[in-house]
């Protein structure tokens, strides 16, 4: 059977990338393989994680490209050069335009650290999502893996997992719990399922 060629787009620490690498190593992901990591931040620790796992990586920044359009064209070029089948946004902190997303219908996945439709959309990313959940006073939050379309965090939901908020939570503590209990599990599971479907 053909294996899906996966590109992971990152911007920061890359713990979700690490969860994907670990899942690939222990067989949770076996219908796809990470062939390329693309970072829009030259200082992202995710790049070190890719190098440690022997995965090719490339840095493409909007600043260097000069415009969002040129940035996205460079990303498309990198994806085409590596014959990528599936794109995974794993802590990728930039919104992609409809020009880009419409090229890859149901071939881009994103992990978001809340139960969509709460605390999502433009402006909700990283720690900010957890700050807003705590400020609102919700008792349950979680993570969502969804397909990416032209609406930020608006594509079809694949998996969600709830996580309880506890007394004394800080945004950092909550972020870690959401990652450990939800993101690092549902992202690899979704990548396996979508890879399998794409290649069948
Ligand atoms: C993760 O919590 C991810 O869900 C979130 O940023 C963090 C990145 O961590 N992504 C977004 O907020 C995207 N809207 P990581 O770099 O360690 O995977």
Image (cartoon, rainbow, N blue to C red):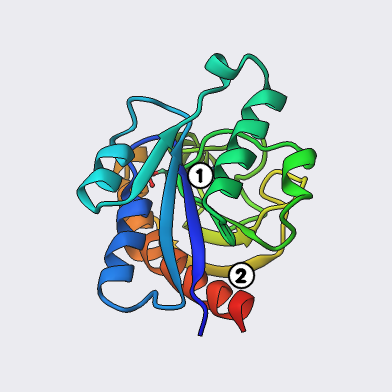
Q: Residue 9 — which label?
A: none
Among all residues in the image, which is located at the extreme left? 52
Q: Nearer the viewer, residue 148 or 137?
A: 148
Q: Nearer the viewer, residue 157 or 46?
A: 46
Q: Is mark 2 within 8 Å of ligand 1?
A: no
User: Does 152 sit left or right of 19 as displayed?
Assistant: right
Mark 2 vs 1, N-terminal side: 1
User: How many neighbours does mark 1 have within 10 angstroms: few (below 14), some (14-19), or many (20 or more)?
Assistant: some
Q: Residue tagged by mark 2?
A: 158
Q: Nearer the viewer, mark 2 or mark 1?
A: 2
The secondary element bearing badge 2 is classed as: strand
Q: Which image quadrant for residue 197?
A: bottom right
Q: Position of residue 48 (x, y in %)?
A: 25, 39
Q: Is residue 196 above or below residue 48?
A: below
Q: At 20% across and 48% down in the image, what residue appears?
A: 52
Q: CA distance from mark 2 to mark 1?
A: 22 Å
Q: Position of residue 45 (x, y in %)?
A: 28, 35
Q: At 60% across and 32% down in the image, what residue appears?
A: 74
Q: Is residue 85 above or below residue 195?
A: above
Among all residues in the image, which is located at the extreme front? 81
Q: Which image quadrant for residue 166?
A: bottom left
Q: Which image quadrant for residue 96?
A: top right
Q: Position of residue 107 (x, y in %)?
A: 65, 61
Q: At 51% across and 70% down in the image, what residue appears?
A: 190
User: Does 185 sit left or right of 148 as displayed?
Assistant: left
Q: Residue tagged by mark 1?
A: 133
């Amino acid at each position: 059977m053909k294996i899906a060629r996966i590109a992971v787009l990152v911007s920061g620490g890359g713990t979700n990338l690490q969860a994907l690498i670990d899942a690939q190593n222990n067989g949770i992901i076996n219908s796809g393989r990470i062939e390329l990591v693309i970072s829009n931040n030259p200082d992202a620790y995710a790049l070190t994680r890719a190098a440690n796992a022997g995965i090719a990586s490339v840095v493409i920044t909007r600043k260097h490209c000069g415009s969002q359009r040129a940035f996205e064209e460079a990303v498309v070029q990198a994806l085409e050069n590596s014959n990528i089948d599936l794109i995974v946004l794993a802590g990728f902190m930039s919104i992609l335009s409809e020009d880009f997303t419409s090229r890859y219908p149901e071939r881009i996945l994103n992990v978001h650290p809340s139960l969509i439709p709460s605390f999502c959309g433009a402006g909700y990313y990283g720690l900010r999502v957890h700050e807003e959940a705590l400020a609102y006073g919700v008792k349950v939050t979680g993570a969502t893996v969804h397909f990416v379309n032209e609406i930020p965090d608006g594509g079809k939901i694949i998996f969600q997992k709830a996580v309880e908020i506890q007394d004394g939570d800080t945004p950092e503590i909550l972020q870690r719990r959401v990652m450990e209990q939800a993101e690092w599990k549902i992202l690899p599971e979704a990548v396996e399922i979508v890879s399998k479907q794409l290649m069948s």
